[in-house]
Image: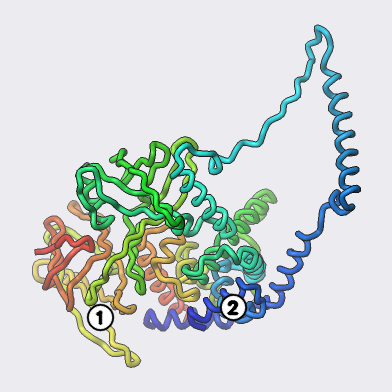
């Protein structure tokens, strides 16, 4: 059974599963819920006069009760005096007014994003429409043409400046932000109040869009309130770019060599490229792994992971992803002293050439 | 229904035209249902969650961002709601000191298939397979949803498919 056949089997089982709930059921339930919300609480159903009288009565009762309660504890020289305590609800840190007018805009925009996202159970796309971070010219007049360039600059500890731009406003505001904490993968302090953390180095390129997105987290130091945001940069897609991530696990030891070969097969009229990764030792084939690379538009997806070989004294662990291979086929990859042999050129997706 | 048609339905719903809900529901119900089923592994509970998700969806129509995939949104909402239900019920069953596994009322035609999937795969693999094969989410979207690296998702998916292939072959 091929992988595709297995997937078809799963889909068939899913299609066979009847879902009893109909659209009508849902609309009925939705209407019921709406009606419930419209029902006024009892104290508002009586009209203005009735409402006023109701509130006045409630106030009298509460006031009377309180006065008795308070009087009980007040005895000259007594030790059981009870002091009433009234605590105000803690003010929401999100709504706390900010001195910085620009961040006022930012924090309210973020709030709007979060409130809208609350119904989703988690903040999905929070603030990505409201807050956009773009690299701008730094103090030493270095122009960062991409976020990736800015990241590289950060790695060499040069100061970096990002502008916090209220994207939904007609006038744009800029707040200089300087990098502070180099120990966290990526941290930028914004007006000493927010810190921007890059959640991970995950880059995503949408197939139909020309945007580069990096997930990040904006954290307010004093109360740890945090918001997920995206850093967006438009990029130009290279037309013949092929990204290959290979999925398999290989046990690797020093001086092992691998070769990769490919062939084309036709299945149901669709052309597939089949790759074989062959491990050799002393010229003999030790193991062989085959995998298919299926094209999804212009992207081929698989992930290549080399795990620690059990029982071997020398072993290597690398995870290779987003490996870009210039067409058409094989290349040579050097990992420490272990050679994974392909023919051609190989690059990491950040442009660094792997080999030669 | 294409993405454009789905978007058209969404726009109609936002205008208050509830007649568009029927088509919208038919095209998205499977994704939403299986988003919950992947966690709860129970037909009835998954349908309850699905209903709650759609009601919430209708309540927040105005705030929905049309540039985002509504299918992914629904699957995410279903997942989160299912997780809430699962946690609540798990605590309830733990307090009762009964068997920790939630009772299943899954009696449908091909429940044997999903039962076998449950046996062969761990929770994460099960969910990833359902999200990719049935909900047709891309690995990147699943990685983002589950807060896992892309490589892990792809690796787990392939590992799960191999397990299923072997499991079904052994069964035959």
For label 1, the crowd category at 10 Å Cα-Cα, with few meaning under 14, some 14 to 19 and many 20 or more, is: some
Where residue A188 appears, as percent x and y from the top left, is 34, 43
Q: In the image, are marks 1 and 2 on the same chain?
A: no
Q: Is residue A244 left or right of residue A88?
A: left
Q: CA distance from mark 1 to mark 2?
A: 39 Å
Which residue is depicted at the point 60% across and 54% down?
B87
In the image, which is nearer the foreground, mark 1 or mark 2? 2
Q: Is residue B39 left or right of residue A162?
A: right
Where residue B59 appears, as percent x and y from the top left, is 65, 64
Which residue is depicted at the point 86% across and 24% down?
A67
Q: Which residue is mark 2?
A: B24
Q: Is residue B5 above or below residue A107?
A: below
- Residue A96: which quarter of the image? top right
Where residue A278 appears, as percent x and y from the top left, is 18, 72
Q: Is residue A32 left or right of residue A62?
A: left
Which residue is depicted at the point 58% across and 83% down?
A16
Q: Which residue is mark 1?
A: A274
Where residue A108 appears, as percent x and y from the top left, is 52, 48
Q: Is residue A47 left or right of residue B31?
A: right
Q: Nearer the viewer, residue A87 or B34?
A: A87
Farthest residue in the top direction?
A77
- Residue A271: which quarter of the image? bottom left
Q: Is residue B12 above or below residue A255?
A: below
């Amino acid at each position: 059974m091929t992988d595709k056949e297995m997937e078809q089997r799963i889909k068939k089982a899913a299609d066979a599963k009847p879902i009893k709930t109909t659209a009508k059921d849902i609309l009925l339930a939705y209407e019921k819920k709406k009606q419930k919300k419209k029902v006024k609480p009892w104290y508002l159903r009586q009209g203005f006069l009735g409402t006023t009288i109701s509130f006045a009565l409630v106030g009298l009762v509460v006031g009377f009760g309180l006065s008795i309660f308070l009087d009980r504890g007040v005895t000259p020289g007594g030790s059981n005096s009870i002091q009433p305590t009234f605590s105000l609800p803690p003010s929401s840190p999100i709504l706390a007014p900010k001195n910085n007018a620009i961040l006022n805009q930012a924090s309210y925009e973020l709030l709007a994003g979060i409130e809208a996202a609350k119904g989703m159970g988690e903040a999905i796309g929070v603030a990505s429409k409201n807050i956009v971070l773009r690299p701008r010219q730094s103090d030493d007049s270095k122009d960062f043409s991409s976020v990736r360039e800015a990241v590289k600059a950060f790695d060499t500890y040069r100061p970096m400046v990002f502008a916090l731009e209220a994207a939904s406003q007609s006038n744009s505001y800029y707040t200089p932000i300087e990098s502070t904490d180099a120990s966290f993968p990526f941290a930028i302090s914004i007006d000493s109040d927010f810190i921007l953390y890059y959640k991970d180095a995950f880059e995503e390129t949408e197939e139909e869009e020309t945007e580069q997105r990096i997930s990040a987290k904006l954290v307010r130091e004093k109360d740890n309130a945090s918001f997920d945001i995206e850093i967006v940069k438009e990029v130009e897609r290279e037309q013949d770019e092929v990204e290959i991530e290979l999925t398999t696990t290989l046990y690797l030891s020093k001086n092992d060599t691998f070769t990769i070969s490919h062939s084309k097969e036709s299945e149901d009229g669709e052309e597939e490229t089949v790759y074989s990764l062959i491990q050799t030792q002393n010229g003999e084939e030790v193991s062989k792994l085959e995998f298919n690379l299926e094209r999804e538009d212009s992207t081929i997806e698989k992930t290549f992971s080399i795990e620690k070989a059990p029982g071997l004294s020398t072993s290597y662990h690398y995870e290779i992803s987003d490996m870009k291979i210039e067409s058409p086929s094989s290349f040579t990859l050097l990992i420490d002293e272990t050679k994974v042999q392909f023919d051609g050129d190989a690059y990491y997706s950040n442009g660094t050439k792997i080999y030669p | 229904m294409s993405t454009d048609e789905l978007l058209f339905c969404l726009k109609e719903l936002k205008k208050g035209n509830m007649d568009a809900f029927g088509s919208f529901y038919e095209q998205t119900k499977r994704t939403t249902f299986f988003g919950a089923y992947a966690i709860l592994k129970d037909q009835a509970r998954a349908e309850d969650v699905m209903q709650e998700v759609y009601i919430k969806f209708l309540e927040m129509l105005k705030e929905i961002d049309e540039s985002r995939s509504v299918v992914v949104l629904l699957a995410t909402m279903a997942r989160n709601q299912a997780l809430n239900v699962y946690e609540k019920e798990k605590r309830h069953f733990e307090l009762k000191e009964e068997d920790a596994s939630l009772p299943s009322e899954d009696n449908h035609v091909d429940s044997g298939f999903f039962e076998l999937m449950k046996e062969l795969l761990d929770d994460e693999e099960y969910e990833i397979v359902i999200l990719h094969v049935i909900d047709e989410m891309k690995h990147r979207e699943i990685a983002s949803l589950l807060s896992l690296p892309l490589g892990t998702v792809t690796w787990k998916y392939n590992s799960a498919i191999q397990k299923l292939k072997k499991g079904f072959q052994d069964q035959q």
